[in-house]
Amino acid sequence: MVNSQMVNIFASFIFFTRLPFWRLYQPPKEAYATVVEHWPLVGWLTGGIMAGTLFLACHILPFPIAVILAIIVRLFLTGALHEDGLADFFDGFGGGTDRQRILTIMKDSHIGTYGVIALIFYFLLLVGILTSLPPMTAVFAILAADPLAKMFSAQIVNFMPYARREEEAKNKTVYRPISFLSTVSLALQGLLPSLPFILFTNTTWWFAVLAPIFTVIFLFIFIWRKLHGYTGDCCGAVCLLAELSFYMAILVLLETS
């Protein structure tokens, strides 16, 4: 018998990755309403494999190639789920003039000009920042950043309602608000992988965590003013931009120290 917590964890790994966890167990539909509560835990897997790929690849390949390979591995793990959300987010907010138009564009499966430009600049910045870091700093930063960004981004379900009706959701799932105990669990999931980063790099770089906090606050306010609610695409976009801001802050601290 699988307990309810394990059921919800299975649902998170099935929902946020393309790995065949569903072959081991298929959770009931209601479990998918809780997936963001274990989103950082999924980041342990995706961030861990990405960091591990970078660590191994940089010993046999030029560092920029190793970084690109590590990014590709994570894209395969997640099915580019969050990158799809980022593209839809920029298409919607870039091309939409009102709430309904933004939601309509974001739901369209076709990618537009704003989405293409957003992905180009996102990957240019991601590759550029990671290749500018010392290899081991980049490895530990990835381990910390993936769960951390997911932890902050998951809070959106407590700050605003879903922007559409449940039946209009692209994945047919609306996340439930996170309880106090789940919030504590979420914080531990997001922060624990940061400990190696703090212990084995420059401890002053802990201040880099302020960057995703401010990024998430800014994006939450922006999304609320435009939509008065969130969508799954918003979650993906906030996650990637929070993660990117964390890497950027580390690079700034490195360059100024």
Image (spheres, rainbow, N blue to C red):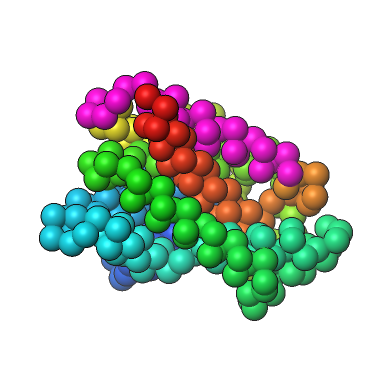
For residue 235, above or below residue 152: below
- Residue at point 33% right, 62% down? 68
Q: Main secondary structure of the magenta part?
A: helix
Please state the horizontal and vertical placement of residue 20, each as a whole percent of the image: 32, 69
For residue 102, above or below residue 176: below
For residue 60, above or below residue 43: below
Verify whether residue 203 appears in magenta: yes
Q: Relative to the observer, which residue lies in front, 41 or 94?
A: 94
- Residue at point 77% right, 69% down? 104
Q: Quadrant of residue 143?
A: top left
- Going by the picture, which residue comes out furthest to the bottom? 110
- Res. 51 visible in picture: yes
Please state the horizontal and vertical placement of residue 144, each as a whole percent of the image: 35, 39
Please state the horizontal and vertical placement of residue 21, each as a whole percent of the image: 32, 65
- Going by the picture, which residue comes out furthest to the top? 204
First to last magenta residue range: 199-222
Q: Is residue 91 left or right of residue 126?
A: right
- Residue at point 77% right, 65% down? 95
